[in-house]
Amino acid sequence: MLVPSSFTTSVLPVQENVVKNIIFRVSALCLQLAVYNLCSYCAFKSKAYTSFLMFAEDYIQRLFFISSRGWSRSALIVLGFAILSPLAGLYDTLLWSLDSPGYVIKSSRVNGSAVDDQLLTTPPYIVFIANSAGNVNSIDADAAITGNLFKSGFNFTFPPMNDLSRGDIVPARQSLADAGGPRIWLDDEGFSVGIDSFSPINPHCSLQTTDDRNQAWGCHIPNNESYGMFSEPLGQPFIWWDGNQSEYMRSFRNDNPWKSLGTGGDTAAMKQVFTVTKDRRRHTFLETVLKVSMISMSPVLLDDADILEMVRRTFSDDPANNIQPSTKNLADIIVAAQANHSSFSGGTFLQQDYSVGATSIELLNITNSADQSPIYVAFRVTSTNITLIRSETLPNPVTPLSPCPLYFSNLATGGRLRSTTCYLSTATQGPGARFLGQLDASAVLILSDVLGDGSTAKAATALNETGLLWYQNHTEHIDQVLASRAFILGGDRESVMVDVQHAAPALSYLQLLLSLIPTLVALVSILLIRRDKRGYFQSSFFVAVHATTHLDESRCDKVGYSHVPPEIRLDVVDGHVLLGTPNGGTLGIISLGSVDPPTPSEKDTDFVNQDSYHTVPTMEGL
């Protein structure tokens, strides 16, 4: 059983609006036919042939007829026809007014290269998801990530990408301990990508390799060095082009807010899909950086309970359960460091075949560089992950944007070359100086005001539970859509599928029902009017004149279509306009009794009264 909403909603697609218009118009014509036949049947049953003839006249003539007949049955028949016939003609307008909304959204799936002509000329490579309203249910992640990519009016969505694990790696050339941190190895010359393993580790700390997959550090650091760590940007991938040449992949200061948001306090997240190309080999990576902070201005310290709560929510395997002993020990270290007015940094590195990760926890007492007086205390937890999602061989090797005598690389965003690292290179000019490759931040997503407010001293507001749950539930989908945008901008567009939506005219079940009803009523009216055996209430006045005046050998007891219509002309005789017949005669009226009426067997007494019967013969020379 259809619920009312689905009964009145447009769900039945048609090819074009013209098809829909034809359906509605035919329905209106059927209703007009039904009105004509039903009124003709009423005239037939009332023996009101003049009323039937008025159906073919205009409104003025009908008005004269009605006024001359008063409130008689024949006048009411004409009045009903004059009202119902134009209303039936508007029936298609009524059907159009029932559109709700009148169309359905149809989708066709094509690859990204098929919609090149719909791309904006310079689509931005950075997108934002914010929650200024404070309601995560109002966040539309798809709209935020796919916005400002295609031309206005182009409706599309990105289906899930199921092939984000086609990267090619080689065996590690160095052990985790010798490499100085986790890397994703890409060729036998040392080409690899990893996490910045230098910035989070103070020189006072030593990196301990616990096994071939894990490294860890943890130590107290001088307060006067804490600000340098606090202001170091997070989430900078580190690129080794070979065994000797390496560099950071840095954000552009002039258009990437993460350049500043990735330093210091605040609670935010950043995801980026970037490519690293060396010669003809291009590798695509997905990076996720999460930063959670609490800050308290001196001399007020962070509450121990808030520190414990933050550690529990960020480090526990199940934040909903009670805190685990290992997590409690970590929180105790932070609490003790704050009580001693010292700074602490600790964390882990994780090495996997196709991904590398890092997690850090810091309590930093930021002091005045002049007199070492405390300014504020910051508690920060960060997490970074870089995953190889695709490797491919280009038809041609990447070429430098401009010449440079040093070791350098191209810098691009959103697939567009912007500059080189020539001006940043510290390598001296020599016989080996060369172009290394190309770095492209294809698509970057920044989340702010979603996870919390890192400028506060309370764990509940620094890391909003509702925002965190929203992020955890949507992060995989966000990765998929962001990767699709990145491949459209700076990768292999043919590998991205795009669901293109367009509006198709549609009918509702209510409109379909109302379109069929006039057809059924018209069929019933046709069956009713067929009770007129002679057919005069089914035919025009021209046919009636043709039959009753015997202009040819056609019969008058049963009329229908005139297969060979006679020629009737207007003649003027002695100042009188007469209807002329094909044989030179004219049509006229003779008085009653001039001819013998037909016998009762020759006429239908149900059709016409005996006393009022008149003959209208063809008159020669009248």
Image (cartoon, helix red, strand yellow):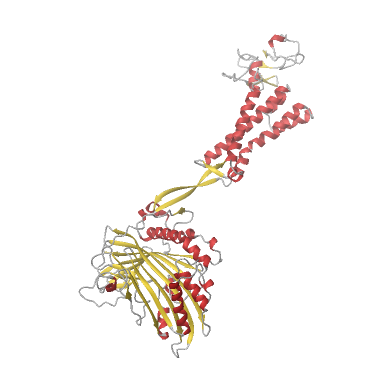
Q: Quadrant of the N terminus?
A: top right
- Give me the residue at 56% from left, 64% from top: 135
What is the count of numbered marks? 0
Please determine whether, in this image, residue 361 is positioned above or below residue 547. Answer: below
Residue in view at x 68 percent, y 25 percent: 40
Q: Nearer the viewer, residue 414 or 353?
A: 353
Residue 301 horizontal/vertical position (percent): 51, 82
Above or below, 55 relative to 145: above
Indicate the quadrant where residue 174 lies.
Answer: bottom left
Image coordinates of residue 139 in percent, x first then y, are 52, 61
Residue 467 visible in this rendered orientation of the protein: yes
Q: Quadrant of residue 212?
A: bottom left
Q: Quadrant of the C terminus?
A: top right
Q: Is residue 455 visible?
A: no
Is 243 left or right of 164, judged from the image as shown? Answer: left
Spot the residue most to the bottom: 371
Q: Position of residue 303 (x, y in %)?
A: 52, 79
Between 37 and 57, the residue placed more toward the observer is 37
Q: Residue furthest front?
A: 325
Q: Position of residue 68 (x, y in %)?
A: 78, 28
**Does residue 586 appear left or right of residue 211 in this picture?**
right
